[in-house]
Image (cartoon, grey):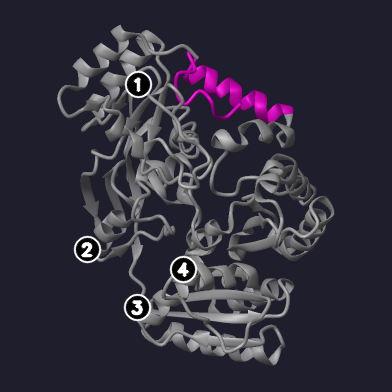
Amino acid sequence: MTSPSPQALDALKAALGDGGWTDDPQLIAPWLTEWRNRWTGHTPLMLTPRSTEEVARAVRICAEHRVPIIPQGGGTGLVGGQIPYGEVLISLRKMRAIRDVTPLDDAMTVEAGLTLLEAQQAASAAGRTFPLSLAAEGSATIGGVISTNAGGTQVVRYGMMRDLVLGIEAVLPSGEVFNGLKRLRKDNTGYDLKQLLIGAEGTLGVVTAATLKLFPVLRSRAVAIVGLEAAAASIELLARAKAETGGAVEAFELMKRLGMALVLKNIPDTREPLESTPEWYVLIEIASGQPGAAEAQMERLLEVAFEEGLITDAAIAQNDAQRAAFWRLREEHSAGLKPEGGGWKHDVSVPISRIADYIDEATAAVERFHPGARVSVFGHVGDGNLHYDVLPGAGQDVAAFIGRWKEGSQVIHDVVARYDGSISAEHGLGRLKTEEAMRYKSAVEIETMRAIRHAMDPLRIMNPAVLF
């Protein structure tokens, strides 16, 4: 990749004017390192446009000069797709407007730099809910979660981000603006172009705004943590929870004891949620539109689960503080593992019915490949998504362990492939998995995606290092 010419950089600076760019290394530095410190990049220029027109102006100049671009939201991605290595960085964080909220349409139009938490708060202020929830929601932006098709904890009820987007505005690689900010649930008039942009990781355009689906505010909510002897019991428990509540399960999060123990060890102000210390935990959240219904459903579910031997222990949160404390134990899993010296991180999905079999087979494969390694599993049983992390064993050489990461990941992902799963459930491919994905994608899939990309970005200026 050639560096942007001085003429191109001068044209970009002139086009965006004062406050629309910086080349100060100190100001740019916080946006160049991925959260896990796996990638630290560099860029000659960071653009901070304040409007869609400024984004379009910048992209047109980049296309004219063949300057590669990387769009960036909140910088919370975990596969390195937002980190530039010489490309011009376009940060959308100044585009934070809430353009429109229409409760009767259950819709809200916001700009790409608005954080997910701010979008949730805007929906709440209008008497509605925007249900996507992530541990990084205070930093992750709407443009970023669209471009990576983020999932989070409530996919079991509401679906992925692509299920929550009604319309998109984006600047295409040519610099043209696609204005698809519709509030329609039905529109069968050709290809759904917004769905191409969702999950494209900035390769087909820069998302500048979106119209999001809103939902009614639910009037009762219950959260519990339960203990299980085996992961297989969680699958039966999920089926029972869906049946007992009529589909009111909003989250169903599996956690292995190792991950829980490391959260308790490394994260301040956390405590054991149960009297016992089972090998597996599940956090369950049920929500209902009827006051008091969720609490009654949770009590009935746990009673049945005890009777059927699915769970060995349980605790129901009695107030908002306890609910937050239970959720913190789940949401701090990644942070709890981080001080352990590094590990092999995996974001995989398999059919829900095969989760326990996958865990058993993958763990046996890891033990054969690297005896003594520790396996931490946590994730969203309700949608088949597991965060399967492997840590060095006690006394093992951490540097040598990290050096085996690529081979170890292939061992784990080969098991995923045997279960017809995915090597990236919700994080995307980015720099981390683009090359590896070619091992598991069919030639037809790869060539079709390449053709779509070439049609929309023949110069390959948009996030050129990711997606085939």
- Residue 374 is left or right of residue 134, and the answer is right
CB within 8 Å, label 1 to label 2: no
The residue segment tinted magenta is 443-468
Badge 4 is on which residue?
A: 267
Decide which of tag 2 and tag 4 comes sooner along the chain. Answer: 2
What is the C-alpha distance between the residues marked 3 and 2?
A: 15 Å
**Pointer 1: residues within 10 angstroms few (<14), some, or many (20+)?**
some
Please tell me the numbered disc located at residue 301: none
Where the C terminus falls, by quadrant? top right
Between marks 4 and 3, how big is the CA–CA gap? 32 Å
Kind of residue indicated by mark 1: Pro
The residue at the point 61 percent across, 45 percent down is 424
Residue at label 2? 125
| Residue designated by label 1 | 44
- Whether pointer 4 and pointer 1 mark residues with C-beta atoms closer than 8 Å, the reply is no
Front: mark 4 or 3: 4
